[in-house]
Image (spheres, rainbow, N blue to C red):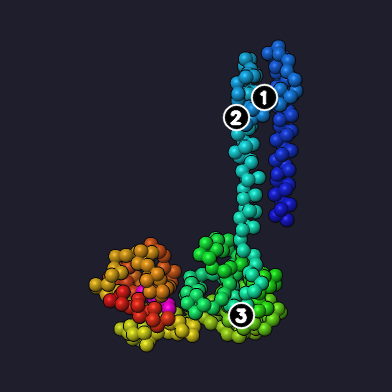
Amino acid sequence: MFRLRISRSIFSYILIFILLILIYSMVFLYLMRTYENRDYEFITAIYWVVATITTEGYGDIVFDSSIGQLFSVIVILSGIVMIFALLSPLVVTPVLERTARRELPLKVRADLKNHIIICGYNQLIETLITELDEYRVPFVIIDENEKNITQLVFRKILCVHGDASDEDVLLNSNILSARMLIANQSDEKNASIVLTSRELGNVKVISLVEDTAKAGYLTYAGSDRVISPKALFGTYLGRKAIDPLTVHLSGATRFFADISIVEFPIYLRSVLIGKKLKDAQIRELTGANIVGLWSGGRLSLNPQPEDLIRENSVLLAVGTEKKLEALKKMTR
């Protein structure tokens, strides 16, 4: 369908352009004969129109009459519209978009086996990516967002562009030879992903649920395990409300097998004070991921690279015990 729309756009543009050249050529011959007393061949008329409409204007053939000069202005302006206003949106942009889509990965290599399929990319998955890379566990990320896929391709992370609830997309991700599938999209989307994966095989499925009330539906759909990140955050924050001075890793909340969520207050002489999150390079230096930031008495679970780390800030981090210990040293 997309290819058909592009073909029609190009065909329409070429047809309009040719008709415009023919009409302008006939008008050119009429004006030259009537107001300039000059006769030209039709091929000469086409030459003048093409040179003028493309704003080249060699100047070897010009009008002396006012009406001829006005016609020349009309031809030039219509050429600008045809080339700059219509050529780009009708021809150039669709072709570029089509080329860009062709470059997005749509299938993994056939020999990829015993891997993990992650459906949906976000900051939470970044922590999982780090751990899977460290333990050299093969994985592939499926995502519909072109920007996310482009970034993953740039980072050389194996990925597939498409709808994870689509049977063909899962087959192109080698679901039949996968060890696990993680559904990390909306609860409704996750249910579709789980149902589709169950129709294709018996891969182990873990679903991340947004609304804990819908956990039962995902289990009924076929999920082997349903995890609620918000519930885990709530459990951790509840612990901190009971014992706000606890900063030991032993009080961390487990997320996955070896991954925990820990809160780190920023102390007076910490090297992080006064730095933006992007400049602190916490993930590069420790391997831990910052998923929350207490600042001014408010908790943001979507910290931005421009957020400033202050003396009274508290970092909410996710990672293994070793990585969180490294971060703990930076906060002291």
- Amino acid at circle 1: Trp
What residue is drawn where x is 63% and y is 23%?
Answer: 72
Task: Please give the label number shown on residue 48.
Answer: 1
The range drawn in magenta is 315-319
* Residue 325: image location, x then y, percent: 35, 80
What residue is drawn where x is 73% and y is 56%?
Answer: 1
* Residue 219: image location, x then y, percent: 62, 84
Rounded to the nearest whole Å, what is the CA distance between mark 3 and mark 2?
61 Å
Q: Residues within 10 Å of mark 1 (few under 14, many from 20)?
A: many
Task: Please give the label number shown on residue 114.
Answer: 3
Q: Residues within 10 Å of mark 3 (few under 14, many from 20)?
A: some
Q: Quadrant of residue 9?
A: top right
Q: Is residue 8 left or right of residue 117?
A: right
| First reached walking from the N terminus: tag 2 or tag 1 | 1
Describe the element under mark 3 as helix, strand or loop.
loop
* Residue 43: image location, x then y, percent: 74, 24
Residue bearing mark 2? 55
- Amino acid at circle 3: Asn
Rounded to the nearest whole Å, what is the CA distance between mark 2 and mark 1?
11 Å
